[in-house]
Image (cartoon, helix red, strand yellow):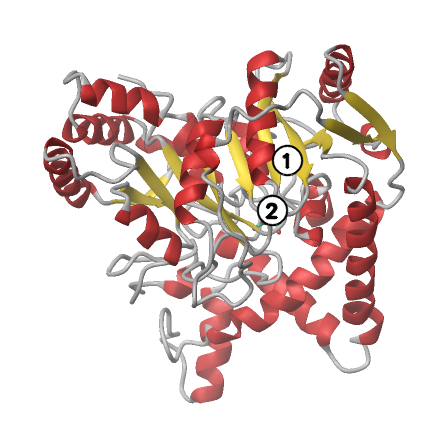
């Protein structure tokens, strides 16, 4: 049993070939067989089976929601009431969510089944899942390689068919980069489209929750269910949420695409990824689309700005983990001060500590103007420049990642090298634009890679339609 879309599942259910219970049993079996991948930190087996029986009954009485038959995994930084959430960190040891994230509530309301929580980089900081306190996730396509990060477990879960879809979070590429490395679809929505309530915050002005799926239809469906206004997240747009799944077949014959020459010329871009991107550009031209090169000589600013601003926000967001209110408390603490210091030193992993220190530094008196304020100005500049490009076209086409999945340990000795993995993904987070990674490449080394579209704010509908066209025709 292997299903590649919800439509397929629902068709088999309708014809009596499959029940939701059998479906969940199938996924649980596969999860069991693939334990070595270390994808799930926890599987909600009994509960998922129970819910499956309920959904089967609802289907019989015609009362099921539109996600009936969708089995979903959650990145372990999304809260689900009465379930553990750890952000793959020791510091949240023993912590149980007191409420569900808005996205989780909305999915459950439409009868999605949540099957477990997926391993990730600690507090979503990383590009390889090697920063989890609970061990590496193996790339299902090559066990000697990383699945990407930080939503590495979530991408691997979909690629290994352990559930139909997962939710990840993307602050600088954490949905799109692992999707690219695992050969699945990953969307980072427009900032302000999806409620962040109940997502463990990393850098609040960059974070968005989004779907990882096998196809565009499922991503569209999940997005229409979870997007839109929520009284618990004041950054959300009041713009109405389109019925994305119904707009997939809109006309995309007049789509205008731009590509950044600077991206294709970037050192470190794998030649085969460059070749495939160029090939798609040529094919699009032949198919009658306008595809124009544009200048964007600012690539070298993207990663530094991202790391100055996100670490600043992280240092503030992570101040709440101090061993008093929740999670891990050092056994060696003797007073309040040592509780804070020792719990944080023992509870946070090295990369998280590095980022908290960096963020504290860029916000400190004397350096604030040189780093944080300057970073904000550069962010605004990059937003304006990106908007200027998108005023003349519908999408920017670029690779999602500079290479394919790398080996464990290959980038860990040099944080800068690891940070450069994010070179093509951070632009969308810095600017707030939606972006998607599409599994459109196969390297001669046998591994997949993604192609990326960055679109105009709140134009996910068009992005889904064009993505569908690209995946089907190219
Ligand atoms: N890889 C990036 C980082 O390490 C992105 C993380 C994310 O999007 N959460 O920060």
In-front residue for pair 253/400: 253
Quadrant assignment for the N terminus: top left
- In the image, taking residue 383 as reference, residue 193 lies left or right, namely left
* Label 2 environment density (alpha carbons within 10 Å; few <14, some 14–19, many ≥20): many
Figure check: 198 above or below 421: below
Q: Residue at x 62, y 15 (%)?
A: 445
From the viewer's side, name the closer residue of 224 and 172.
Answer: 224
Q: Secondary structure at mark 1?
A: loop
Q: Position of residue 271 (x, y in %)?
A: 77, 19
Examine the rendered structure and indicate whether residue 362 appears above or below residue 240: below
Label 2: which secondary element: loop
Residue nearest the viewer, comparing 298 with 364: 298
Mark closest to the chain's N terminus, 1 or 2? 1
Tag 2 residue: 458
Q: Could you say which disc has been placed on residue 195 in the image?
A: none
Answer yes or no: is residue 148 visible: no
Residue 193: image x %, image y %? 53, 52
Residue 60 sits in quarter: top left
Q: Residue at x 15, y 34 (%)?
A: 62
Residue 378 coordinates in the image, percent (x, y): 82, 59
| Residue 456 drawn above or below residue 447 | below
Q: Position of residue 439 (x, y in %)?
A: 56, 23
Residue at position x 71%, y 23% from top?
A: 254
Crowding at dot 1, Cα within 10 Å, few <14 / some 14-19 / many 20+, comes out as few
Residue reaching furthest bottom? 335
Residue 297 located left or right of residue 242: right
Q: Quadrant of residue 176?
A: top right
The residue that disc 1 covers is 410
Picture quarter with the C terminus: top right
């Amino acid at each position: 049993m292997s299903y590649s879309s919800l439509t397929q599942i629902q068709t088999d259910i309708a014809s009596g070939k499959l029940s939701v219970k059998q479906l969940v049993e199938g996924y649980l079996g596969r999860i069991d067989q693939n334990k070595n991948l270390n994808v799930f930190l926890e599987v909600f087996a009994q509960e998922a089976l129970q819910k499956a029986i309920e959904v089967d009954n609802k289907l019989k009485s015609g009362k099921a929601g539109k996600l009936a038959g969708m089995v979903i995994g959650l990145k372990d930084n999304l809260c689900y009431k009465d379930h553990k959430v750890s952000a793959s960190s020791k510091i949240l040891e023993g912590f149980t969510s007191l409420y569900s994230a808005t996205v989780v509530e909305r999915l459950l309301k439409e009868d999605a089944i949540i099957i477990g929580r997926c391993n990730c980089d600690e507090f979503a900081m990383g590009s390889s899942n090697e920063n989890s306190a609970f061990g590496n996730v193996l790339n299902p396509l090559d066990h000697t390689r990383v699945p990407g990060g930080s939503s590495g477990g979530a991408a691997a879960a979909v690629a290994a068919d352990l559930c139909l879809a997962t939710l990840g979070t993307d602050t600088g590429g954490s949905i799109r980069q692992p999707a690219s490395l695992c050969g699945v679809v990953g969307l980072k929505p427009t900032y302000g489209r999806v409620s962040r309530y109940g997502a463990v915050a990393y850098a609040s002005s960059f974070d968005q929750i989004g779907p990882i799926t096998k196809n565009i239809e499922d991503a569209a469906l999940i997005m229409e269910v979870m997007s839109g206004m929520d009284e618990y997240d004041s950054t959300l747009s009041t713009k109405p949420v389109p019925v994305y799944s119904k707009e997939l077949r809109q006309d995309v014959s007049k789509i205008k695409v731009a590509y950044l020459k600077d991206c294709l010329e970037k050192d470190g871009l794998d030649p085969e990824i460059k070749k495939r991107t160029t090939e798609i550009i040529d094919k699009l031209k032949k198919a009658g689309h306008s595809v124009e090169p544009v200048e964007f000589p600012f690539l070298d600013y993207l990663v530094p700005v991202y790391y100055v601003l996100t670490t600043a926000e992280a240092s503030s967001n992570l101040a709440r983990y101090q061993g008093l209110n929740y999670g891990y408390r050092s056994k060696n603490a003797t007073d309040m001060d040592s509780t804070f210091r020792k719990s944080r030193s023992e509870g946070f992993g090295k990369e998280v500590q590095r980022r908290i220190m960096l963020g504290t530094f860029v916000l400190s008196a004397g350096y604030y103007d040189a780093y944080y304020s300057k970073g904000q100005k550069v962010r605004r500049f990059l937003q304006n420049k990106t908007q200027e490009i998108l005023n003349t076209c519908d999408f920017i086409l670029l690779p999602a990642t500079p290479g394919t999945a790398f080996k464990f340990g290959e980038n860990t000795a040099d944080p800068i090298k690891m940070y450069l993995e994010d070179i093509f993904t951070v632009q969308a987070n810095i600017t707030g634009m939606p972006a998607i990674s599409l599994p459109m490449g196969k390297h001669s080394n046998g591994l997949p890679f993604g192609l990326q579209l960055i679109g105009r704010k709140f134009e996910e509908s068009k992005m889904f339609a064009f993505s569908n066209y690209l995946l089907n025709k190219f």
